[in-house]
Image: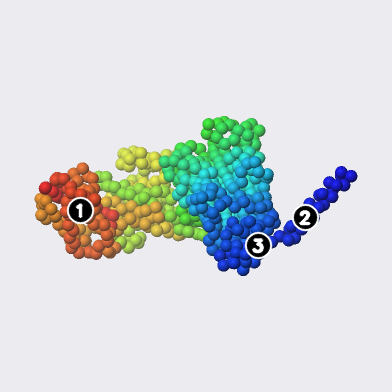
Amino acid sequence: MKLKLSILRTLLTIALCAFVYAHAATRYVSHSGSNTFPYTTWETAANTIEAANLATLPGDTMFVDTGSYQLTQTIVLPSKITLRGKGMDSTTILGSTAIVDMFKPGDSTYVEDIYFRGNNWFRGFTKYLGVSLFTWTITRCKFTNFLSAPIYSAWTERVDVSHCWFGGWGDPGAIAVTDRGDCTITNCTFYSPGVVRPICSFSGNSTGHEVFDSNVVVGGGFIGINGLGGGAELKYNLFCGKSYMSEAVYGGVAMEVAFNSFYMDIPWNFSYADVLTISSLALGRAYIYNNIFAGMNPRVIFYFDIPDSADIRINYNCFYSNYPMTRPHIGHTNGTGIIDSVYGNVYADPMFVDPDNGDLRLQKGSPCIDAGAPWILDVDGTRSDIGAFGGPGGSVYIYQDLPPKASASMTAWRDRDRVILSWERNSESDFLHYILFRTTEPGALLDSEHVLTYLDRLGRPIGNDNHKEPLGFDDDGKQLDQEQYIPMYAVKDLRRVYYVDWYPIDTLTSYYTLVAVDSSGLVSSVSSVSSASTAAVAAGLAPAQNSGDREGRPYGADVTPQDGVTYELEPNYPNPFNATTALVYHLPSIGAQPAPVHIEIFNIFGQRVKTLVDTRQSPGRHTVYWDGTNEEGQPLSSGVYFCRLEVSGIEFVKSGKMILMK
C-alpha cells in the first residue's frame, strides 16, 4: 500500500508540473504599459523588473521591452524562468550602487537579448555555495561596467554562455565558475584592450569540464583563462592584442588546446610572461596541437613536476617571437618531467594579415598553411592549417597576397668615409630580396640608375656589389666585421640587418631608400633615411637621421639646401635682454608643405624649458617672441639659453647664446 501511495504522489507531481508548464505565462515589462497586475499583455505591462518578478511563477517568461530599466534591489528569479529582451542594442538593465548582485537566478534559467550594465557595481548573475545545483543558459547578451564577474557561480551543475559581448569587469574574470560545475563558452567576445584583466576563472574547480570554443579575446592578461579543471577544451579561439604581465591560459588537470591563434604583443620587458602555462601536480593529459603562439615570449611551459603517468603531446604548432627569446619555446619552470611528444612544430613568422588590428587570418605564403596535423583536414579537403581558421571547425577564405612589410627603424650614421645603414629584418617566409637606392636629392625618382645594391634577408649582396666590401658571416647568420666599423653589440641583434656604403657620393647629404620584394614580385612601401657629410655638419646644414616608423612611413621629409636657400635662424634681438626678445627664422620651399615646425628653448644643461612653436607653417620669414618664462609661465633666472629650430622632425639650426639678464 505504501508503494502504491508513493507512485500516486509521483503521478500527481508530474501532473501538477505538466499543468504549470501548460499554463506558463509571459509577464511583460514596458515603460508604456499601464502597470496592471498580472502584466500578461504589453498594454498591462509592469513598468519595473521588480514588479514583474513578483508575478512571475516557475516556467514563466519575463519579456522586457525596448529601453533602460534601473534595478533598485537584487532580483531573485524563480526556477525555469526565461528572461528575454528585444536585443542587446535595444533592452538595457542597469545595476545600482545600492545592490551587490543584479540577479540571483534559479534552476534552468534562460537569458537572452539583453544589455546588462553594472554601473560600476559588482556582479550580474550570481550563485553561491549552499544552494542546490543549477543550470543556466545565457545567450546574445552584453555585459559592461562591472567591478567583479558579470557571471559568477560557486556551485553550479552547468553554465552555458554563447554569443555574448563582455566589455568591462574585474576579478576573478568576466565568467567565473568555481568549486564545481561544467561550463561551455562559445562565440563570445571579451574586449579589454591594453587593460590588465583576467578573462575567465575556473580556479578551484577540479571536477568540472570547461569548453572555451570560437571566442575572441582582445587584450586582458594577468592569467587570462585561469584554473582549467578536471577537463578542458580550448579550440578555435583568437587571442589578440596586448596581454600584460602574465599568461593567456593557465591550468590544469587535463586539457586539449587546438586550433587557436595567439598574438600576445606584450611589452618586451615583461620577459617572464608566457602564453600557455600548465601548472598541476595531478596533470594526466595535455594535447596541444595546431596552435599559433606569436608575439612576445610565446612559450608553452610546465610549472612544477610532470607526473610520470602524464601523456603530454605538443605537435604541429607555430612559435614566433618578435623579440629574441632567452629561453626555449617549450620547457619547464621550477619542475622536471618528460614531454612525450614534440614534433612537427614550425618556428617562423605565421604572416598574419593585420595582427595589430586583430586580423589573424593567414597571408598567402604563410608557413602555417597545410602545416597542421596531417590526419586532420580543413573544410576544403586539404591538410589542416595551423591556427584558428584551420581544421573542421575553421573556415574557407582566400589567402591575401600582401606585399612585405616596410623595413622598420631604418637608421644611418657616418663613420670616416663610409655610411653604416641598419633596419629591422623582414621575417616573411615569401621574402625575396631588398633593393637599396641612393640619391643626392630628396624625393628623387627611384629608378635603376639610383639602385645601390640588391641584398638578401641577412643583408648580403646578391650578385656583384661594387659599393660594399663583403662582411663575414658565422653559422648563425650573424655579420662579422673584422675592423669593427659596425659596433659588435649591435651586430649580435639578429633582428636587424646592417649594410656599409663604403664610398658614398661626395655631396652634402646622401639619401637612402629601401624596399622589400617578395617572391610574387610585390614591393613594400619605402623606408628612408639620410646621412650628412662632414662638410654639411660643419656648415650647420645637416639633417638628423630620419628613420621610418614600424609601418615604414617616414617620420618627416628629408630635406637639404637647394639653390642657395637654407633654413635660417637669425640672432635674437635684443641680446642680452631682460623682458622680451625676438627670434626671426626662414623656411625655404622644400619638401612637403606646410611643414611641421618646432622651436624650443634650452638651458645650458640641455634641458628644454619652453616650446615656442609647435605647428605647421608655410615657407617664408617668421617671427616669434620669448618673454623669458618657462612652460608654466614662471620667470626664469638670469643666464645663458639656446634656441633650436626643428622642421619635419629634423634639427637644422641652433642659435647662438641668448643672454637673459634680470
Whether residue 546 sits left or right of residue 250 in the image: it is left
Question: Which one is nearer the viewer's eye here, 556 or 450?
Answer: 556
Name the residue located 19 percent from the left edge and 62 percent from the top edge.
622
Name the residue located 30 percent from the left edge and 58 percent from the top edge.
557
Pointer 1 and pointer 2: residues touching (CB < 8 Å)?
no
Secondary element at image label 2: helix
The residue mark sitting in front, 1 or 2, is 2
Q: Name the residue under label 2.
A: 16
State the image quarter where residue 472 is shown.
Answer: top left
* Relative image position of residue 489 (x, y in whole percent): 35, 39
Secondary element at image label 3: loop
State the image quarter where residue 31 is shown.
Answer: bottom right
Mark 2, other Cα within 10 Å: few <14 / some 14–19 / many ≥20: few
Amino acid residing under circle 3: Pro
Amino acid residing under circle 2: Leu
Mark 3, other Cα within 10 Å: few <14 / some 14–19 / many ≥20: some
